[in-house]
Amino acid sequence: MKQRQKSEEVLEKLKEVIPGGCNSPARAFSSLGVMPMIAEGGKQDLLIDADGHEYIDFNMSWGSLILGHVDSYVCEETIDQIKKGSSFGVSTQIEQRLASKVCSMINPIEKVRFVSSGTEATMTAVRIARGYTKKDVIIKFNGHYHGHSDAFLVKAGSGVAHHFDDASSKGVPKEMVSKTISIPFNDKKAFLEVFESCKEDLAAVILEPVAGNMGCVESDLSFLKLLREKTKESKALLIFDEVITGFRVAKSGASEYFKITPDLICLGKIIGAGFPVAAVGGKKEVMDVLAPEGSVYQAGTLSGNPVAMRAGLSVLSQIDDETFYKNLIAKTNEFLKPIEEVISALKMPACINKAGAMFTIFVGVDKVERFEDLEGLDRALFNEFFRDLFEKGIYISPSPFESCFISSSHSQEHLEYAQKEIIASLKRLSNQIESRSLKKECATSSM
C-alpha cells in the first residue's frame, strides 16, 4: 500500500476548516474505501499527490484539461496576463477575443456571456429562456446534472446521486423545483406525454447531449431530433448543457457531433483551461434579452476575468484544428478497444460507453442508455476497481456516475500501462463475480 502520511495530515487540517475537508463533495471519495486524493501538482498526463506519488490522470480536472497539466503555452499566456493585472471589474479586449473565438468555432453561437461556473451558465440559460419565451416550465432528464442551483436538483445524477438516494438536496424548497419536470432520458414516449401536458407553458428543454454525470451516455439521435422538433413547435428553447462536451466530443461540440442546432449552449471546463470560466451562448436575438440590452438580469464581478479569458484563448487556439480531434479520438479508441474486447470475452456484466475523448467503464451492468439502467450498478465492485487502479498509480474519476477523459498529453507508454492494469483488474473482478454466482447456486441447490 502507498504511504500517504502527508496527504492524511493535510486532510485532517482541511476538515477542521472546510465541511468534509473538501469544497466539492465529489472530491470526498465517499464509500470508496480509500483516503481522498490531496493534489500537490501535475505534469502532462500525471497528477502528483502531497506525498509525491504520481498517478496517470483520467479525470483531468473533470474534463477541463484537454491539453493535460501545465501546458507550456497556457502557462506563458496566463503568467503574462497576471503581470498586467488579474482583475479590473471593467471590460477588456481579451474578452472580445475569446468570445469571437468561441463564436467562430461553434456555429450556433453568435453571442456569448461569460460567467465563472457551469452552475452559473445553466442557471443563466434557463433565465434567458424564461425571459425570451415568457413561459416558466423547464423539462430536464433523470441523471443529467446541470449544476447545483435549486431548480436543477431534481434526479440530478453525479455526486448528488452518490450522496442522496433521491438525487436531490436538503435546503431546496419545493416551490423552487415546482416548475422543473424531470423525466427518463432517451425515452420518447415519456417525453411526448409530458410535453403534451405542459407545452403551452414550456420555456425550455435542457439536457446534456452526451450525459457525463451519470457516466458517459449518448443521446439517441432520433430522441434529439424529437426534442428539436417539439421545442420549435411550442416556441420553447432547446438548451444543450455542454459544460463537459463543449470542445470535447468534437471541435464544435455536440451540435457538430449530432448535427442538431440548439437555441442555447452552455460551456465550461475546457474554455477556462482549468481556471473558473463558463459561458452561455446562442443566437443574437435570444442572447440580447440579457441586460444591458434586455431586461433579463445577470452579473458577476469576476465574469470575463482576464486571466481566465487569456487561459481559455490559449487552449482554443491550440485545438482549433481538425487533426487535433482526429488524433485525440483515435488515441481514445485505440486505448479502449482491447478493454472492450476483454469485457466481451469474459462475458462479465460490464460495458464501456464513449463519445469523442470521454468514456465510462460501467461495472455491474451490460448496457446503459438512461439513468434507470444504473439501478443494477455494482458500487462495491466499482469501489474495488477504483482502489485496485489507484494503488497501481492510475486515477480514474472517483465515482461510478462520472466520465473519464483522455487528453492530448496522454503518452503511449502510460496508456499501454493503464490498459494492461485495467484489463488485469477486470479479469480479477470477473473471477469474483463468477465465484459469487457459484456460491449462490450451491446455496440454492442445498435448500
Image (tube, rainbow, N blue to C red):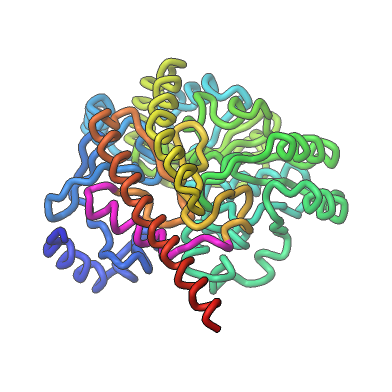
Q: Is residue 21 above or below residue 122?
A: below
Q: Nearer the viewer, residue 174 or 339?
A: 339
- Give the magenta range: 375-394
Identify the image quadrant of residue 30: bottom left
Q: Is residue 115 visible?
A: no
Q: Is residue 180 above or below residue 210?
A: below
Q: Can residue 261 be found in the magenta stretch?
A: no
Write the residue at 41% across / 65% down: 435
Residue at figure coordinates x 78%, y 38% from the top left = 226
Q: Is residue 115 above or below residue 432?
A: above
* Residue 208 vertical placement versus 12 (above, below): above
Judge from the rendering whether residue 259 lies leftward or rightward of residue 420; answer left or right.
Answer: right
Residue 215 visible in the shown view: yes
Q: Position of residue 135 (x, y in %)?
A: 78, 50
Viewer-closest of 313 and 321: 321
Task: Report the magenta stretch's main SS.
Answer: helix
Nearest the eye: 205 or 30: 30
The percent coordinates of residue 27 (x first, y second) are: 35, 59
The C terminus is located in which quarter?
bottom right
Q: Is residue 380 magenta?
A: yes
Farthest residue to the bottom: give it.
Answer: 447
Say which of 345 and 291 sits in front. 345
Residue under the point 34% across and 55% down: 428
Position in image of residue 391 (x %, y %)? 22, 55
Q: Position of residue 229 (x, y in %)?
A: 80, 35
Q: Quadrant location of the N terminus?
A: bottom left
